[in-house]
Image (cartoon, coloured by chain):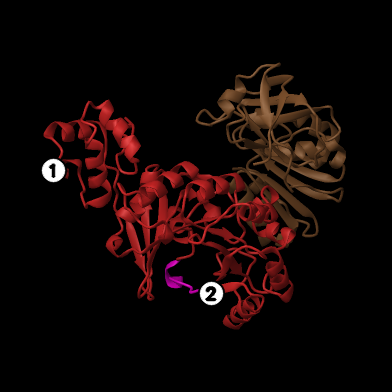
Chain colours: A brown, B red
């Protein structure tokens, strides 16, 4: 694994019942979409998280949800400003350019797209964001404000005005036309990524235009 | 009322068994006896452990299940390959493929229920991820196989990414190779990965078993389209990690390479493979792609495979073509269990 460096966190805010945003000063360059490894102890194996902040911001934000059986997140959730964590340098190739594209995310899979968005790459993108509840549509207000109708929030367990009711897969399946020339960036659970990728390919999108990121 | 599942004995290391017997106030040597019954003998219930005292058997039975479960379904191919379905403790289905040949009887075991890796060509990916298998669930595929006494080789190439379940996989490897366990030679065991580097390094340091790496394309962009893991752990870094590790003479590194029609078998691929594998003592196993439903990829013909093999060998790369097995019984990884789950 890449070498670890120590950082002092500036905040660790609980934004919904189990989701947190961890913030610390940015001391490195990165490409939006990249990940860093995080550990509470330098002897531990770091876990990977996508950076959720822009690449010109002073602070780095990491979005995470607490998994009660997880090795890292219960400990992460107990951290407070002033506490120390250990991070790797950023790495990874889930990056996109300024060309028009469609971003599809569920859950914390929104993090790399949030980074791209806050880095100024959201201008000609369509963002389809899904979660079970609206509270899990992280950064929704910012997306809505800046992207307008190019932002499609969706929920599977809550019916809310302005939010599509159903899975992102269903939203795409109901679309009359899908542009095969666009690139489709997918990030979320393996099931969503595979289902959406299959649908896009079935609807005529060449598989080289489907770029998938996975969680593990 | 939902009854909580009890812990199981099968799949525990000797150290864990020692902890268990200590916790039950049993003599320390009971752990060695237990390991012997679990991994060297064909018992089906705790009460058959006849050299344990009645008290010991009673205490064990009160607190633990044995943890063995028979396959719930088997399909047999015309070529002798058998695909077994087992039920994991979470109720989901996993599969193992038994492939008999004249002098070699190989079992391909699963390490997870479903998979998180999302490879474009793999049917297991379509199940999503439904859980890690414990060491006991991995080993049960071997222990409860009707042909277990014939097995010569074990490959971790079934459902799931083994290095995404290091705890279960490493523990099962210990029990497979330890004298107290199945006492198999590590040279008969191969673990396959798509290249999760930190876990691969731990495996190389701690296990003497063979390593197989799924390669499928030497070009970063092309591999990324087939295997999303390339975004996080690039092949270049995987090869660097392998280069940095002293492999010794006995250990073998192989690269699995599924050949797709008109995609990854050009002279350009041959040249690049020769370049990136230079200096690594290895071989390439070519596998013909077997189309899974909904895939945009197609299978190559025999001649393409042979020509690709010859071109690689001309570059000095030891290359084999793996015989396709069990095509008539959904032997491709994940097909049978997905169909069974969907049928429910």
- The numbered disc on residue B321 is 2
Q: Is residue B324 magenta?
A: yes
At 61% from the left and 22% from the top, the residue drawn is A77
* Residue A128 coordinates in the image, percent (x, y): 73, 42
* Corner quadrant of residue B290: bottom right
Chain of the residue under label 2? B
Q: With respect to residue B275, does B186 lie above or below?
A: above
Give the residues in magenta.
Answer: B320-330
Secondary structure under the numbered disc 2 in the rendered image = strand
Q: Is residue A195 magenta?
A: no
Is residue B3 toward the left or the right of residue A99 in the image? left
Q: Nearer the viewer, residue A159 or B284?
A: B284
* Residue B223 coordinates in the image, percent (x, y): 68, 60
Is residue B14 in view?
Answer: yes
* Residue B132 coordinates in the image, percent (x, y): 46, 44
Identify the residue under disc 1. B50
Chain of the residue under label 1? B
Q: With respect to residue A183, does B199 lie above or below?
A: above
């Amino acid at each position: 694994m890449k070498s670890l460096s120590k950082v002092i966190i500036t905040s660790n805010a609980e934004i919904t019942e189990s989701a947190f945003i961890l913030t610390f000063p940015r001391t490195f360059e990165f490409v939006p979409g990249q990940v860093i490894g995080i550990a509470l102890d330098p002897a531990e194996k770091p876990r990977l998280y996508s950076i959720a902040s822009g690449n010109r911001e002073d602070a780095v934000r990491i979005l995470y949800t607490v998994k009660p059986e997880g090795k890292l997140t219960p400990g992460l959730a107990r951290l407070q400003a002033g506490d120390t964590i250990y991070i790797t340098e950023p790495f990874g190739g889930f990056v996109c350019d300024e060309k028009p594209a469609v971003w599809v995310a569920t859950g914390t899979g929104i993090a790399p797209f949030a980074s791209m968005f806050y880095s100024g790459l959201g201008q000609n993108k369509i963002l389809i964001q899904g979660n079970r509840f609206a509270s899990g549509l992280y950064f929704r207000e910012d997306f809505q404000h800046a992207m307008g109708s190019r932002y499609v929030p969706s929920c599977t367990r809550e019916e809310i005005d302005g939010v599509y009711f159903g899975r992102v897969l269903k939203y795409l399946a109901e679309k009359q036309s899908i542009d095969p020339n666009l690139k489709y960036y997918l990030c979320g659970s393996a099931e969503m990524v595979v289902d959406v990728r299959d649908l896009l390919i079935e609807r005529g999108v060449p598989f080289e235009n489907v770029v998938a990121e996975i969680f593990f | 009322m939902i009854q909580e599942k009890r812990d199981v004995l099968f799949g525990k290391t000797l150290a864990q068994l020692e902890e268990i017997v200590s916790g039950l106030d049993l003599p320390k040597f009971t752990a060695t006896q237990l390991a012997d019954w679990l991994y060297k003998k064909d018992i089906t219930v705790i009460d058959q452990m006849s050299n344990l005292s009645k008290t010991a058997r009673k205490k064990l039975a009160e607190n633990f299940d044995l943890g063995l479960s028979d396959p719930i379904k088997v399909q047999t191919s015309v070529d002798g390959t058998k695909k077994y379905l087992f039920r994991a403790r979470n109720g989901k289905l996993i599969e193992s493929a038994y492939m008999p040949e004249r002098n070699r009887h190989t079992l391909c075991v699963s390490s997870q229920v479903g998979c998180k890796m999302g490879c474009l060509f793999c049917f297991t990916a379509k199940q999503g991820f439904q859980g890690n298998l414990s060491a006991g669930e991995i080993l049960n595929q071997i222990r409860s196989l009707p042909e277990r006494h014939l097995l010569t080789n074990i490959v971790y190439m079934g459902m799931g990414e083994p290095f995404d379940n290091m705890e279960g996989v490493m523990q099962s490897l210990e029990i497979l190779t330890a004298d107290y366990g199945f006492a198999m030679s590590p040279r008969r065991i191969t673990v396959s990965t798509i290249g999760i580097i930190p876990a691969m390094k731990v495996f190389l340091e701690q296990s003497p078993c063979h390593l197989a790496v799924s390669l499928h394309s030497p070009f970063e962009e092309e591999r990324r389209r087939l295997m999303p893991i390339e975004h996080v752990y690039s092949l270049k870094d995987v090869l660097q990690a392998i280069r940095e590790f002293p492999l010794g003479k006995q250990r073998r590194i192989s690269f699995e390479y599924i050949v797709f029609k008109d995609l990854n078998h050009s002279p350009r691929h041959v040249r690049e493979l020769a370049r990136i594998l230079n200096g690594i003592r290895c071989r390439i196993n070519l596998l013909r792609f077997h189309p899974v439903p909904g895939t945009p990829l197609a299978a190559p013909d025999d001649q393409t495979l042979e020509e690709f093999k010859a071109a690689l060998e001309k570059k000095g790369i030891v290359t084999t073509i793996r015989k396709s097995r069990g095509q008539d019984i959904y032997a491709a990884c994940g097909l049978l269990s997905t169909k069974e789950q969907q049928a429910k």
